[in-house]
Amino acid sequence: MSNQKKPAYGGQAVVEGVMFGGRHHTVTAIRRKDETIEYFHLPRKTKPSFQKMKKIPFLRGIIALIESSANGTQHLNFSSERFDVLPEEDEKVQKEQKSSKLEMIFGIAAIGVLSFLFGKFIFTLVPLFLAASLEFVFSGRTGQVILESVFKVILLLLYIYFISMTPLIKRVFQYHGAEHKVINTFENGLSLTVENVQSQSRLHYRCGSSFILFTVIVGMFVYLLVPHDPLIVRILNRIALIPVVLGISFEVLQLTNRVRSIPVLKFLGYPGLWLQLLTTKEPKDDQVEVAIASFNRMMELEKESESGLKKAALV
């Protein structure tokens, strides 16, 4: 089976583990304090209206981001709460969480979406104000937009650098590398063994890190096409165009993944791959084992769901 015909599975690094998502399920596997592997599973439930919008170019990227922010936050919360809990403490922790489990899940999902939107606002507006403060040196639409984009890149790199200095995030970046290695192993048609996975690249064209960088590049070109002055108009344009920039950036990300095997075009995804040199690290074998376990469990659930749908169609 060629790479193009394989399902496009995605994933996310979490605290001491990896989450993988398919068409019907998302699964996280984490390494707990006693070295055992524990799983967390959420079925994908997409509203019919969302399902239709996911088929519309540019709009589908917004829907995918909302869903991934909501689901990803739940998986991240699971990993952060469970990885350092000893088995003998399980019953006590479960009793404390049981009474408010439903409220907690919806609350976490909402926080995930809001955190993403808040971060995007900060990432959009702070560079704008920094560039505007230097307008007496870099005047004109083109100069201001380019300077704004430069500040965005600097802000992004500084953010990644400072968070990567913490031991926890360093390990998350290692699991991020393990996630990419597993996806690359699967897409290259190799069996998921630790040896095969470790032989693969820790970089991937479809990574969220690449998407973030593409929002900077796409935003620069979009902002050159809209009114620039006065400053309040510039601010309102940036806020109003956030969904537009996100939608276009998602399509660019998908495009770079589709053309990555074409020698003349594969360089289009290089900027995102370069950023991944910072957001991923080489994983250890035990981290790769967790990533493989997560992917295998997700595949098992996906096959069960597909089998169930085929049986239902025959009835």
Image (cartoon, rainbow, N blue to C red):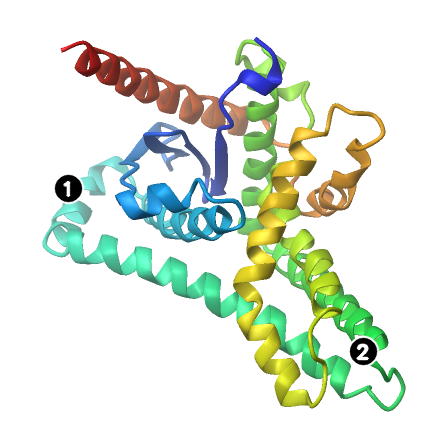
Q: Residue at x 65, y 45 (%)?
A: 252
Determine whether 299 is above or below 67 in the image. Answer: above
Instruction: Determine whether label 2 and label 1 are within 8 Å by CB.
Output: no
**Residue at (83, 25) in percent of width and height:** 263
Q: Is residue 86 above or below residue 228?
A: above
CA–CA distance in space, label 2 to label 1: 61 Å
Q: Is residue 16 visible?
A: yes
Judging depth in this view, the residue of 240 and 217 nearest the camera is 240
- Quarter of the picture containing the N terminus is top right
Q: Quadrant of residue 241?
A: bottom right
Which residue corresponds to mark 2?
141
The residue lying toward the viewer, choosing from 134 and 312, is 312
User: Which residue is identified by label 1?
Assistant: 91
The amino acid marked with disc number 2 is Arg
Judged by depth in the image, the label closer to the viewer, 2 or 1, is 2
User: Which amino acid does the dot numbered 1 rest on?
Assistant: Glu
59 relative to 188 in the view: left or right: left
Query: Is 285 in front, or is 193?
Result: 193
Residue 170 visible in the shown view? no
Task: Find residue 26 and report its horizontal and vertical position in percent.
Answer: 36, 34
Expressed as whole percent of the image width and height from the top left, the position of residue 286 reads 52, 25
Q: Position of residue 116 (x, y in %)?
A: 47, 61
Q: Residue at image x 70%, y 79%? A: 227
